[in-house]
Amino acid sequence: MKWIARTLLFTLTLFIGLSAVWFWSSIVFHEFRVTPPISASVPDGEVITHSKDTGISIAFAGWEAGATDENEPYLNFLIHNGTFQPVSYAAHTPAYISPHLRVNDGEDIPQFSCGTGIKWFFIMPGTSAMVRIHRSSFGNHLSQKNRFSIGFYLTPGLGESKMYRSPQFELPQEFLDQK
């Protein structure tokens, strides 16, 4: 009986020790970064709807004129994590994730970027992150006639990375008029 108790105590101690080592190594060696919670207003009429199967939603959240280093207008998108686990994504900075543009329900037009310096960012449960898409990402598709949706590869918890997409939206005329 004494050996059973010692074996259980050893196993429990080993499990706690390995869990602590894994947690600290994920912070130190994998640059654990949490995207800060934000509050953002979504344009009138835009409704954030959660994906029925996941609780993750993406919504168009307006545009801004040239407030970045490139002085180029960009669209804002709100990624909301309505799950009970962190959602991760790979990007150079928390605000600039590589989008997959879809025009008029056609094929995805992926945006390619250099993978050097990519880090993992996390959106904690019940919080949101604001990401930006530059005007140049739309290439020759800039038109008031086109309807767009934006997709991002996100990884919920320990699951597989998959594409999550915004509902369709039209580009605001003011955004199209920016040079």
Image (tube, grey):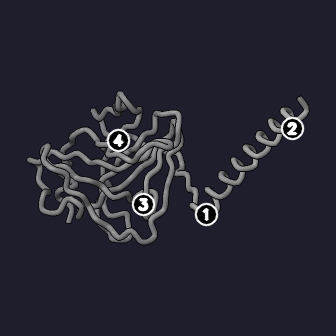
Give the numbered dot on residue 29. 1
Q: Position of residue 165 (x, y in %)?
A: 29, 42
Q: Position of residue 59 (x, y in %)?
A: 33, 41
For the residues labelled 2 and 1, the Cα–Cα distance comes to 34 Å
Q: Amino acid at mark 2?
A: Arg
Q: Is residue 142 left or right of residue 157?
A: left
Chain-order first, disc 4 or disc 3: 4
Mark 3 crowd level (few <14, some 14–19, many ≥20, 10 Å Cα): some
Residue annotated with mark 4: 58
Give SS at disc 2.
Answer: helix
Give the numbered dot on residue 91. 3
For the residues labelled 1 and 4, the Cα–Cα distance comes to 30 Å
For the residues labelled 4 and 3, the Cα–Cα distance comes to 17 Å
Chain-order first, disc 3 or disc 2: 2
Q: Is residue 82 left or right of residue 107?
A: right
Chain-order first, disc 2 or disc 1: 2
- Give 44 or 166, whichever is nearer the viewer: 166
Residue that appears at 35% across and 70% down: 114
Q: Nearer the viewer, mark 3 or mark 2?
A: 2
Q: Amino acid at mark 3?
A: Ala
Mark 4 crowd level (few <14, some 14–19, many ≥20, 10 Å Cα): many
Asked whether the viewer can see residue 39, the reply is no
